[in-house]
Amino acid sequence: MKKVVSIILITLLITSFVTGCGNDEKEEENGKVDIEASSDEITMKDGDNESVVATNLNKSVDLPEGYPEDIVPIYEDSFILAASKNSDESYMVVGLTNDGSDKVAEFYDDILKDAEVIMNYSDVEGYNNMGEYKGYTYTILANDENDGELDYKTTINIILVPGSTKTVFPAVDENNDEEKSDSNTKTNNNNNSSEIVVPDGKEIPADYPEDVLPFENGEETELARVMDQNGQKMLGYMSTSEIEDVHYYYENLLKDSLTYLVLNDSENDKEIVAAVGNYQFRILLHRNDESTGEDLKFKTLIQIIY
């Protein structure tokens, strides 16, 4: 789950803000974004939306007015790198700490022990907790390793959106599965999609929400493996499409979701987290090479954790 500062800031501003520098106004298609810079921070305003990013790494920015710290507090002694508040009363905060993500996980698992958790996992790369708690849909991401660009060990992203995911997207009827095909292919539900090859002895899980997250519509795709992972299910498949094209496919499909975050966007690996309906997805893309042992006609390996 590597992230560099540019990815953090893009994540922070993804909803409605435009990055820039200097004391000017930047004309946007839907209005004006006011940008003010000081020696300590940059502030961007677009109507009732406001975002602040620290430029002085010795001085945290303030939390936005109204941030519900009694519900989801900021990790103790964190440096607040950036914070935003939108007109819908949603918040995003990026914090930094020298504690490891395991300590951050302990802190938030205790705070959110009574939450309706949708996704919660910790591994050697970091921590991800998503769910609903006291009137908010929350996403908390923490990862160790800042590529040496910051004097802190761990980055923490907090996203709070008022309301439930169930009120934003229609719920999925998991008991209304389509009748399975007798052939070794399964057709995607999106337009102009290809068929995914399902080899003998393998099977797409009956509960996989293909109507919510269809397979990438490349020239050729093939199911690779299905397994349980940390209490969740993982489906892996391969595509003849280049990794950039697969990334664009998922970006176009999910960018308007309640939560859409790009946690890694390197040349050979990409990671997306998205909330759609009652589902939280983690999508990992890897450029196929000789080290994987997979057929090299497939350019990209895709893992979907749900």
Image (spheres, rainbow, N blue to C red):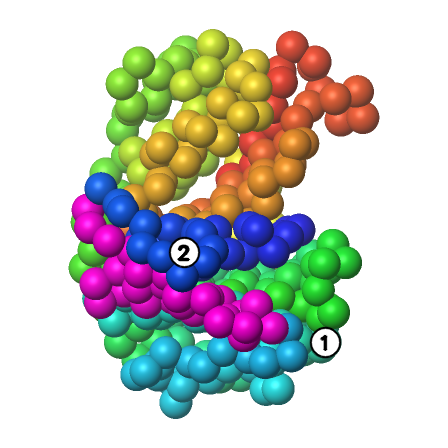
Occupied quadrant, residue 160 = bottom left
* Tag shown at residue 13: 2
**Does 162 appear in magenta?**
no
Q: Position of residue 263 (x, y in %)?
A: 55, 50
Residue at the (26%, 76%) spot, across then down: 135
**Local secondary structure at mark 1:** loop
Q: State which tag comes first along the sequence, 2 or 1.
A: 2
Q: Magenta span: helix, strand or loop, mainly?
A: strand
Do the CB atoms of the residues marked 2 and 1 lie less than 8 Å apart? no
Occupied quadrant, residue 255 = top left
**Does 32 appear in magenta?**
yes
Magenta residue span:
30-56
Q: Nearer the viewer, residue 182 or 109?
A: 109
Residue at the (59%, 86%) spot, across then down: 76
* Tag shown at residue 98: 1
Query: Mark 1: which amino acid?
Result: Asn
Q: Nearer the viewer, residue 43 or 98?
A: 43
